[in-house]
Each structure stands twice: as C-alpha cells, then as structure tokens.
C-alpha cells in the first residue's frame, strides 16, 4: 500500500510540473526568476524571506541557503521581498532572470529587544537605565573571563583588570561604590539564575550582556541589585538555521612595563658611589649586569579554540559548544587552562508547553612555578642568579663571601635569597571543576497568561596543592612540606513566576508578573599540611607527621517575593512599578526582611502629533525613575552572637566569644533617582544622557573594637553615602553604503561621591583613607609632602599648627596627616570605538580612558627611596624629576644618604601620582572571503583576522600600568579598602598579538 501511494504521489507531482511548464510556455514572456536574499550589512543569507509578484498570489520563500525560485509571466511584473526586521524591497522584473536582494535593517518595524530583569522589553518602551552589549562587541579581547570584555563598552561602568597574570579577574564598579565596607561588586545573572558565577562561562557562549544601572532596572533583584546587575544571556539556535561554527585563534603575549625603568649595573653604581659606604661597595660590582626582568619573563602564548553547533527545526532548539583556552604567562613559570562545555536545549512539546534545559560545565587549571614579580622589580643587577660554575645561586652563601671579602660568588641583595633557588623544586597547582544544571519550563495558560519555572543547581569543587622541597630554604626547617586544600560550593536556586501580557485595543498594553524565589549557598573546606616529605613525592601519605589541619563550613539562604507591572499607552506613555520583599539569613529574626520598590515613567515625545513635521528627529524619549535597593553584610553571620571553639586548654576544646550580637543590624538601603533623555537624529546618530542621584543609608561597616573588649569588632549601620553623576552614550553611522560602512561609538561617565553621615560624626581610618562626613570616600589621607629644601636637600612635610595654619618641617614625626584633596576615583571615564568596513574587509579599534584618579605608588617606597634601601635596585628618574645635588637646586627628589634621608621614603603624598590614562585596547583587521571563493570551498563562511591588544598607553604614571593599580587587592573586603588605588610591584597587562579564523558550515 505504501509503495502504491508513493508511486501515485510521484505521478501527480510529475503531472503538476508538466502542467506548470505548459502554462509557463504558453504565457507571453514567461520565465523563471532565481536569486539570493542577504543582509545588506553582514552579507549573511536570510532564510524564510517572503517573495511574491506584486498584485498576485504568486509567491515563495527563501531556502536554507537564502535562495529562491519564482515564476514571472510579464516583463512589467514587480518582485517584492520582505522579512521581519528589514525594509521591504521592490524590483521590476523586466528581462532579468536572476535578481539578488540586499535587505536593509528596519529599525522602525523591528524594535531592538533588550534583556531586563526577569524578561525582555523593547528598547523604545524602557523606563530604566540599561546598557546592552551585543556579542559582536565582545570579540575584541582575548580572555577567559567575561568581565574583561566590558572595559570601555558602557557608560557609568568602570572596569579595571587587577593583574596581567593569565586568568586574573577584573573589578567592575557601576555608578561608583555604594558602600564603605560591604559588597560593592555587581550581581551576576546568567540565563535567569540570580547570583551565578560570571567567571565560569566562556566569552564565546555569550549572545548578549545587559547592564542594569538604576533602581528601575535593578529593583526587581532587591537587596542583591544595589551595586548594579549584569545579565548574561547565552547563545541559542536561530529558527530555520543549522550552523556548525569553528573558531580558532593563536597568538603571543609580551610583558610591557610602560613608563617604568630600572637601573642597570653602571647606572646603579653611579647612583650609589656618592653615598654608599658599605665595605662591599667596590668596582667589583661592575663585573655583573643582570637584567632580572629578562631572566624572569618570556614571550608567552595564547590560544583559544571552540566548536559550536546551533539548529532549530521549530520543535527542538539546540545550541552546543566546546571551548578550550590556554595561556602561558609573560612572567615565566605560569600556565592557565580553561575548558568549557555548554548545551542549551529547548523542546516545544506543543503550542502551550516548552521545556528548557541548559547544562554547562568547566574546568580551570593553573600550574605555577612562576618567577617572583616582586623580585624582578627589586633584585640588584650586581647579582647573578647563577654561580661561576653554572649552578643556581642560593644567595646567603654569596652574602658571606661578600662580607668576608673573599673571592668567588657574592650576593648584594637584601635577605640573601635568590628566589630562583627555591624555584628549582617548589611548585603549586590548582584545579577548579564546576557544573551547572538549569531546568525549567514555560506553560502558556492562555493568550495573555504564562507560567515560567526556572530551577538551578550549581556545584563547584576546588583542589589546590603546594610542594616545598626539603632542599629549598623555605623547606629546610620542616624537611619539606606538602599541602592540600579543598573547598566545595553548592548553590541552589528556584524561581516560579506568573506573567501577564495583554493588549487592550490598539492603545493600551499591560504586562505584569508575580513571582517567588528561593536560593541558598553552602560552603565547606578542608586543608592539611604535612611535613617531612621525601623529595619529589606528591601525596600526603608519605608525610612524617602533620603540620597543620584546618577546615570550615558556612551557609546562608534568601527567600524573596516579587511583583512588577508595566503599562504603555499609545506607545507614547509608559509607567512601571515593582516591589520586592527579601528575607536573608544574614540578619537576625527582627530585621530579616527588607522591602524594596521602584516607580518609573517614560514619554516618547516623537510620537506626538506636534512632532511629526520634524523630519530630522527620528525619536525622542524622556525617562524618569525612583526606587530603592538594598545590601547585606559580607559576613554570613554578622548580626549573631558567635563563639569559637577552635582553641584548646590542656587538650580540651574551649569556647571563646568571637562576635558580639547586634540584633539591630539592618539592611543597607540605596534610594536612587534617574532622569534621562534618548534621541535619534538624521537616522544616523543615537544619543542617551542619564543623570542620577544615589543615596545610601544605614551603611554597613565592620567597626573595630579595642583589644580589651575581647572582640575584634562588630557589624553596624553607621552612616550615609551619596553618589551622583552623568552618563553619556553616543553612537553614529558616519557612512552607510552598499560597499562602505563607517561607525563610531563613544561613552563617558562622571561620578562624584560624598560621605553624608557617620555614626555620631566619628571618623573612621581605613589604610590611606579616612572616612569623614562631607568628604570623598576615596580621598587619600596621609602626611602631606612639601617638597625638597633647596638649601639642604632635605625632605619637607607640612605640619598643622593649633590655629589651623601650616608650616614646613624637615622632621617626619612632626608632620601632620591631612586630607590631600586627591581621590582614587576618577573624575570621568569611558571608552570609544570605531570600525570601517569596505566590502569584505574590516578594520576596528577600541580605546578606553580614565581621568582625574590618583594612585599611591607604594612600590616607590623601596625602589625610589633616596638610599633608604641600599640593597634594592632603584628606578630611573622620570622626565621632569630631578635629584638635589648642591645648595640652590630646585629638585623633586632629596639628596641621597645611606639609610635614607630623614624618612623621605616613608608613606606621604610624595608618592601620590596622577593615574589618568588613554589606552588603545584593541585593533583588529578582518577579511570575509567572498561568496565565489566560499562556494568552491563548500563552506558557508570564512573569516580571517589579526589583532593587537593593549598596544599603547598614554599616561604620566611612573609605574608599569595605571589601570592595574586602580582597583587594588582582589581578596577580602578589609584588604580592599587598604589597597584600592595603591600600586605595589604589580604584574602589568601584557601586549597580545593574535591571529584567528572563523569557519561556518
């Protein structure tokens, strides 16, 4: 029966073809028209575009290759093509048999859809402040970490890399810091999972990043959105398309030291000879000239490969990716590997139910025998890392030979140690394995009501080990040590949400949602160190005895209820209200829950009748919002009275108080106002301007207690903080023709902060800062440098008299700490980029900048010390610097003395430097092979490119990298406040040169 049906079908098909052929042959001027439909800007084929003969019912659609075939009977026929998101196009058939279409994007018919809190929204309907960064803007930096991709890409978003070491994270500040001592990092949301780990994903997985900045945009995240929200949407398959994509790039990284230069042997000898009276200071030192940076650095390699597949047949949508990233550091001895896997699968069961599964996993590995960055800065060029017979110098033996004046190897550097001696054997390794299971579904109850469920389980395991050989100086006393440390993190998240979306007639549109959310976090760790380790062994079982054992557990949870509604009238007037109630286990029962809200409105002025005659103004919208978000203490148990039982008395565990109870501890709350204007003019220029005022009250701060209290301190709500600023974003299409496209993007952000209130008006010292009412929280507070006495060459500082007047003193102990008026926060910052494309060739460049921030260059205390550290190398004087030599000299540096000149090298504003910079972050030249070549290769697309990263920096900062110095330490929050804006012996950013290709089938 089946065979009979197939035969009958074939007969009918052949008959139908013959009939159509006959009809076409009879028709006057009848012919077959073929062609392809492509995107005018990208050149990609468009699948499913509709084509028809105008005024008839004769039509067809493009196939998977964007090709079509259609019959035309008359030369006067007009062929029309249309596709959602593009301008329709008409071409007269005439005597043509092949017609290709290049469709232009239609910004009016397809509004840009922006990912916002718990959903998406048309950009034209936004009332909040949201910056959207598409995937194609995230491809100009080669990095395994997503946060590094955002540098200079969005106004008001300050991104700074903390180190040039492979795999290092960046710090992100959105509209300044909203807290003195609590969390200041933004919240990450990945595919709807709140509190996700943004560093776990590969940049190649990303489809879009949305940065939520004001209360209207962030309030639905309540207490977790006070520092802004970064929403990451991973890739999914496009309907009707199956694409296999292969990406590969390979390159090198080279350490760049910026303005920083150290002295060589001769320069250091000339510097020392007028003041160094040590017996070892002889011309014998000139026999050795070691460039320690050359010894410890190399041309590293960078490589990234990934394969992805996406397909969508209307029923099942699949995106699969496997990614590998490897980087060898420009400082020798460090290698970083990251493996990432992802599977995003949506299954449309029927018109009502869609099942969603997103599975991802990663492995990060580091292998370190890294040369000491600190030593590369400070070691003496007079010292050789090797003995005369080619062995690695131990250091202390050379110190003995030098002091005794005997022949042979010698060592002049401090501490008598050569880091390379221990590096022969000692090493450390780490491995992080993580997995993420995100399961959910959408159920369409009716045309306007949908239920969405998102459920996530995340697990991370860290294993680190470190080996110290018995032959090394660090392992001598313990006869070698081996340490293992492990930690596991488990995070669970669930969100159940009911969404309403209904249009009432042509004028009204109402959306609303109500949801419940729960998340918890569990951490456990263990670490053990054994001593007496046989040389070369790597398992703890061989240890002669344990040296140290440790371990801990901690957990916290949050429960939330949320509501949001949006109303739009005639696409002109928009209003939004949201409310969220958060309950956190970090607070006591009396203050566990916090309530947060926002209201916002928008007005699309260009939709008004009185604006229709202004042809050059394409759109104009006003936005305003006001709302509240919150913050929690970084401690999971900050409000609880706690005891420690990790001490012992005669072998019996004993409990000691560790944290005093604070039942009044409550949420830190931020109230933010935002006013903005968005415009598009001449159909080429987009402009957005936001003004914001951000007020934080009940500041969470860990207040130190005196030692006699028995406690180190307590979390308290102590004051108020204000941030206000302006953000400007500009994007232009300078030239847009069939062959030539030139665009330019620019953004800038201004932010000023002020401490409005401290508890009882008290001041709080924090490293080189002092938190004081009425002042910038990032202003440096230290001894004030007054220059060099021209008569004596001695250093000078200012001291403040009782009547408030100032006078100079050459005694460091008499100097007065004071506010410097210089802050580690920039006056403004941002980025700009441009790209030019001619046919298949493209050239792009991306810049970042910061202005007005100061850096305390703390490393100069040791290598710009005026003789204070005779056994450290010294830096060369920068342009504009000078050394005092004789009476009457006007100099920036005092005269040098053995041991230093009256503490001139101790902390003071002498080492405060302007950290402003302009960086050329990336230049990329790419070429897309033409269709004629691709067809011969039987591939869909092939793109080749070369790029350079971190190519050029304009700055007055005397150190290696002003950007790395800005955000300071990446560790605990207490260390952050001491180091933010401070530059020690930094690992600067490397310069990268990359070659890559993208191949599509």
Image (cartoon, rainbow, N blue to C red):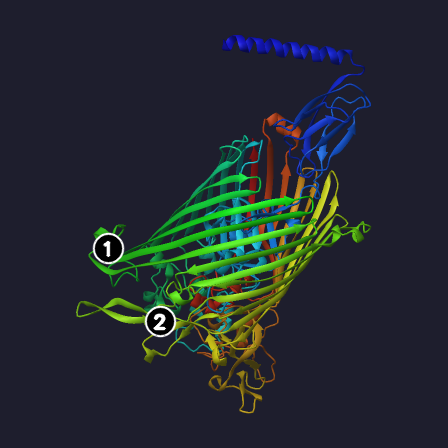
Residue located at (34% from left, 66% from top)? 398
**Marks 1 & 2, CB-CB < 8 Å contact:** no
Query: Viewer-nearest of labels 1 and 2?
Result: 2
> Label 2's element?
loop
Residue marked by disc 2: 661
* Residue 533: numbered disc: 1
Front position in the image: 430 or 233: 233
Considering only vertical position in the picture, is 792 above or below 532?
Answer: below
Residue located at (68% from left, 33% from top)? 38
- Quadrant for residue 920, please give it: bottom right
- Quadrant for residue 995, please give it: top right
* Residue 718, percent from left and from top: 47, 74
* Residue 353, percent from left and from top: 50, 36
* Residue 752: numbered disc: none
Q: Residues within 10 Å of mark 1 (few under 14, many from 20)?
A: many
Q: Is residue 906 visible?
A: no
């Amino acid at each position: 029966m089946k065979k009979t049906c197939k035969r009958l079908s074939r007969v009918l098909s052949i008959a139908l073809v013959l009939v159509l052929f006959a009809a076409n042959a009879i028709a006057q001027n009848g012919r077959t028209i073929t062609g392809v439909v492509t995107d005018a800007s990208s050149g990609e084929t468009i699948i499913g575009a509709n084509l028809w003969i105008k005024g008839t019912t004769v039509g067809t659609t493009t196939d998977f290759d964007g090709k079509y075939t259609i019959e035309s009977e008359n030369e006067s026929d007009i062929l029309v093509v249309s596709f959602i998101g593009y301008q329709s196009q008409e071409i007269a058939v005439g005597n043509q048999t092949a017609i290709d279409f290049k469709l232009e994007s239609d910004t009016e018919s397809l509004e840009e859809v922006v990912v916002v809190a718990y959903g998406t929204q048309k950009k034209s309907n936004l009332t909040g402040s949201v910056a959207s960064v598409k995937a194609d803007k995230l491809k100009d930096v080669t990095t395994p970490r997503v946060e590094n991709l955002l540098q200079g890409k969005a106004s008001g978003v300050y991104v700074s890399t903390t180190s040039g070491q492979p795999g290092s994270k960046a710090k992100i500040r959105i509209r300044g810091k909203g807290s003195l001592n609590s969390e200041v990092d933004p919240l990450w949301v990945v595919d709807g999972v709140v509190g996700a780990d943004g560093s776990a994903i590969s940049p190649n997985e990303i489809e879009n990043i949305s940065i939520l900045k004001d209360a209207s945009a962030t309030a639905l995240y309540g207490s977790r959105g006070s520092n802004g929200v970064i929403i990451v949407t991973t890739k999914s398959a496009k309907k009707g398309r199956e694409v296999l994509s292969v990406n590969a790039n390979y390159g090198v990284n080279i350490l760049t030291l910026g303005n920083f230069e150290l002295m060589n042997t001769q320069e250091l000898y000339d510097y020392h000879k007028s003041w160094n009276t040590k017996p070892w200071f002889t011309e014998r030192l000139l026999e050795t000239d070691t460039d320690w940076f050359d010894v410890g650095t190399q041309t590293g390699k960078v490589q990234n490969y990934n394969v992805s597949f996406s397909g969508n047949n209307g029923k099942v949508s699949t995106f699969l990716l496997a990614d590998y990233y490897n980087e060898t550091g420009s400082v020798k001895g460090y290698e970083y590997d990251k493996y990432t896997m992802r599977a995003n699968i949506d299954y449309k069961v029927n018109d009502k139910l869609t099942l969603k599964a997103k599975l991802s996993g990663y492995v990060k590995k580091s292998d370190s025998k890294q040369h000491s960055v600190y030593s590369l800065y400070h070691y003496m060029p007079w010292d050789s890392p090797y003995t005369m017979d080619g062995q690695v110098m131990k250091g202390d033996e050379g110190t003995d030979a030098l002091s005794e004046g005997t022949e042979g190897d010698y060592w002049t550097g401090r501490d008598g140690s050569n880091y390379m001696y221990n590096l022969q054997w000692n090493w450390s390794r780490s491995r992080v394995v993580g997995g993420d299971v995100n399961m959910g579904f959408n159920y369409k109850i009716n045309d306007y009501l949908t239920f969405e469920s998102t459920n996530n389980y995340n697990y991370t395991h860290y294993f680190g080990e470190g080996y110290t050989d018995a032959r090394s100086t660090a392992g001598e006393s313990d006869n070698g040590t081996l340490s293992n440390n492990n930690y596991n993190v488990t995070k669970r998240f669930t969100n159940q949400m009911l969404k309403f979306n209904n249009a009432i007639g042509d004028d009204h549109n109402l959306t609303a949602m109500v949801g419940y959310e729960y998340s918890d976090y569990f951490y456990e760790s263990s670490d053990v160190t054994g001593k007496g380790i046989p040389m070369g062994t790597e398992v703890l079982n061989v240890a002669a005895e344990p040296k140290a054992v440790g371990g801990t557990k901690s957990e916290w949870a949050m429960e939330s209820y949320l509501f949001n509604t949006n109303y739009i009238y005639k696409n002109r007037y928009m209003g939004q209200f949201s409310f969220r109630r958060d309950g956190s286990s970090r607070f006591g029962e009396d203050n566990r829950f916090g309530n947060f809200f926002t209201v916002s409105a928008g007005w699309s002025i260009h939709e008004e009748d009185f604006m229709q005659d202004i042809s050059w103004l394409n759109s104009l919208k006003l936005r305003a919002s006001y709302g509240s978000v919150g913050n929690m203490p970084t401690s999971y148990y900050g409000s609880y009275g706690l005891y420690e039982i990790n001490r012992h008395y005669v072998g019996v565990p004993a409990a000691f108080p560790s944290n005093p109870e604070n039942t009044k501890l409550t949420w830190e709350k931020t109230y933010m106002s935002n006013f903005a204007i968005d415009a598009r003019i001449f159909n080429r220029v987009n402009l957005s301007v936001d003004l914001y005022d951000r007020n934080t009250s009940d500041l969470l701060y860990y207040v130190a207690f005196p030692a006699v209290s028995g406690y180190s301190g307590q979390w308290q709500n102590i004051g108020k903080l204000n941030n206000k600023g302006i953000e400007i974003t500009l994007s232009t299409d300078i030239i847009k023709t069939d062959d030539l496209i030139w665009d330019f993007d620019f953004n800038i952000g201004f932010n000023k902060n002020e401490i409005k209130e401290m508890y009882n008006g008290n001041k709080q010292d924090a490293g080189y800062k002092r938190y004081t009412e009425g002042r910038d929280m990032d202003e440096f507070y230290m001894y004030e440098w007054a220059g060099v006495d021209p008569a004596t060459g001695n250093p000078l500082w200012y001291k403040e008299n009782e009547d408030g007047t100032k006078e100079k003193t050459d005694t460091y102990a008499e100097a007065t700490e004071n506010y410097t008026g210089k802050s580690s926060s920039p006056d403004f910052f941002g980025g700009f980029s441009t790209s030019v494309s001619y046919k298949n060739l493209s050239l792009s460049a991306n810049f970042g900048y910061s202005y007005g921030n100061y850096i305390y260059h703390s490393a100069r205390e040791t290598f710009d010390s005026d003789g204070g550290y005779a056994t450290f190398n010294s830096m060369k004087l920068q342009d504009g610097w000078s050394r005092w030599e004789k009476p009457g000299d006007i100099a920036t540096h005092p005269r040098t003395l053995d041991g230093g000149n009256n503490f001139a090298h101790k902390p003071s504003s002498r080492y405060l430097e302007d950290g402003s910079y302009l960086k050329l972050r990336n230049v990329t030249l790419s070429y897309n092979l033409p269709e004629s070549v691709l067809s011969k290769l039987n591939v869909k697309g092939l793109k080749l490119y070369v790029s350079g990263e971190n190519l050029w920096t304009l700055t007055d900062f005397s150190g290696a990298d002003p950007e790395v110095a800005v955000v300071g330490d990446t560790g605990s929050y207490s260390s952050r406040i001491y180091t933010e804006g401070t530059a020690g012996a930094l690992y600067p950013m490397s310069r990268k040169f990359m070659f890559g290709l993208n191949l599509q089938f």
